[in-house]
Amino acid sequence: MCKIGIVLNNRDFEHDIYALVKAFYPQAEIRCMEENQNPEGETLLLYVMQSDTGFSLCLKEAGEDGYRKSAGQSNHGEEIALISCQDIREQRKQRKDQIKTLLYQILKEKENRELPWGTLTGIRPAKLVMGMLEKGMKNTEIAAHMREHYLVSPKKTALSITIANREKEILKEINYENGYSLYVGIPFCPSICLYCSFSSNPLSRWEKRVDEYLDALTKEIREVSKMTKRKTLDTIYIGGGTPTTLNPRQIRRLLSCIEENFPTETVREYTVEAGRPDSITEEKLKALKEFPVTRISVNPQTMNQSTLDLIGRKHTVEQTKEAYWLARKCGFDNINMDLIVGLPGEDKEMVKHTLDEIRLLGPDSLTVHSLAVKRAARLNMFREQYQELTFENTQEIMDMTMEYAYEMGMGPYYLYRQKNMKGNFENVGYAAVDKAGIYNILIMEEKQPIIALGAGGSSKLVYDGGQRIERVENVKDIKNYMERIDEMIARKEAGIQWQ
Ligand code: SF4
């Protein structure tokens, strides 16, 4: 594996520089170093030196007689003067953009390769475009800016502009100042998927204590509802984990508590992420239908049984189909399905098979995730066990998912990128007209607060039209959450400054 050292004399923009280098070298081991630190077998050293008036970049490669400047790089090691600017914030942004642009050019030249998202390393490209739309820029002007300033490919430029325009249309009735959304987390799953990095726990270990968890959660629901009285609730999302690991009685208990304490009549969207097909039964779906739930997810991830077995999903393709048709039978008219591309051992043909099967079902929305392997996921921890498997994700496969979505009458409506994403791609949500997930857009656009309840819930409080965002975290550990529920409530009380 290639080792790269990023030598910095100033830690400003360390994260952005690291992310851009990582995007060019996804397999490399990369570390940031101080000027006086000795290399430890790095094959490449990137020097990023900043001064008050400018910066310089220089790439050195390891050779037999030490490190040498990598040949043929633009502006190699020369100080580049910063564009002068009066506004301190703007000046900082420009400095960051200038460094990233030069770094991109140097690595592009060296590797003879471009990145689909150019110099953008953030997870919300559509939010950037939305900001430009809100400033009154035309689509053509935004496209030129994305291409010239951030070096984004024409395809990704078009995708992000299409999505931002659709988001703007969907959000036009949402009151950013007065509205908020509610997230409720159920941290149990029937088994733990190999790639999982969420706070989830096997139901078998917690089954006897689920009611105790609901005791704490319903207490949090009751207390937090008192803090939100002056605001309008726009969307509710019950996620996890897998909410349908709750039995029908527990589902009724949770949803009744939400209904008694929050004004569901103003809610535009009420999602329950049923998720794992092996947790869905007719009785549970009927229990959900007793409440104003508008949208559910039945998530196949793949329709290839061999992959499901490999990734520890412990359900069959047949169960996915049965759960989907059961949900239709129970009257759900907005069903989302999640897919993952880049799963171990899956090639284009296998993804195509999944898409063919999904097309036969005809969901209302489809969320296509590129596999992101985070450090905590078992897939990463047991990397050696899966060494012989290929992890394939290409632009061709991503394009194929988009073509299928269009054929199913869906268009893209939300998008986000993740760190460690295979192939530097993105997650894209597609939906039929009027079936887009509003909560998904709100969480990406950071336009209004999201109050998150339950173990691992991370509330996002948005102030001053998105200029200031603060988080209030609940502990992840279920036992801790239950024991310290009063502290979780007190944290929210201190964090929510709406009065
Ligand atoms: S269903 Fe989702 S939350 Fe549960 S273990 Fe699998 S990936 Fe994690």
Image (cartoon, rainbow, N blue to C red):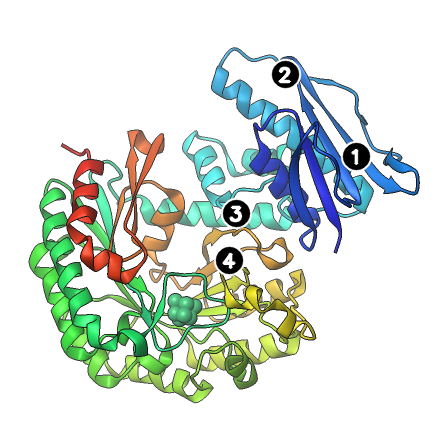
How crowded pointer 2 is (Cα within 10 Å; few <14, some 14-19, many 20+) is rated as few
Left or right of 1? Residue 256 is left
Q: Residue 345: x, y in percent?
A: 64, 76
| Residue 454 seen in this snapshot | no
How crowded pointer 3 is (Cα within 10 Å; few <14, some 14-19, many 20+) is rated as many
Type of amino acid under label 1:
Leu
Q: Is residue 163 above or below residue 341?
A: above
Left or right of 130? Residue 267 is left
Residue denoted by label 4: 427
Mark 2 → mark 4, Cα distance in angstroms: 35 Å
Tell me the number on the disc at residue 59.
Answer: 1
Q: Secondary structure at mark 2?
A: loop
Q: Identify the residue shown where x is 61% and y is 67%.
A: 383
Residue denoted by label 3: 160
Mark 3 or mark 1, earlier in chain: 1
Q: Residue 420: x, y in percent?
A: 57, 54
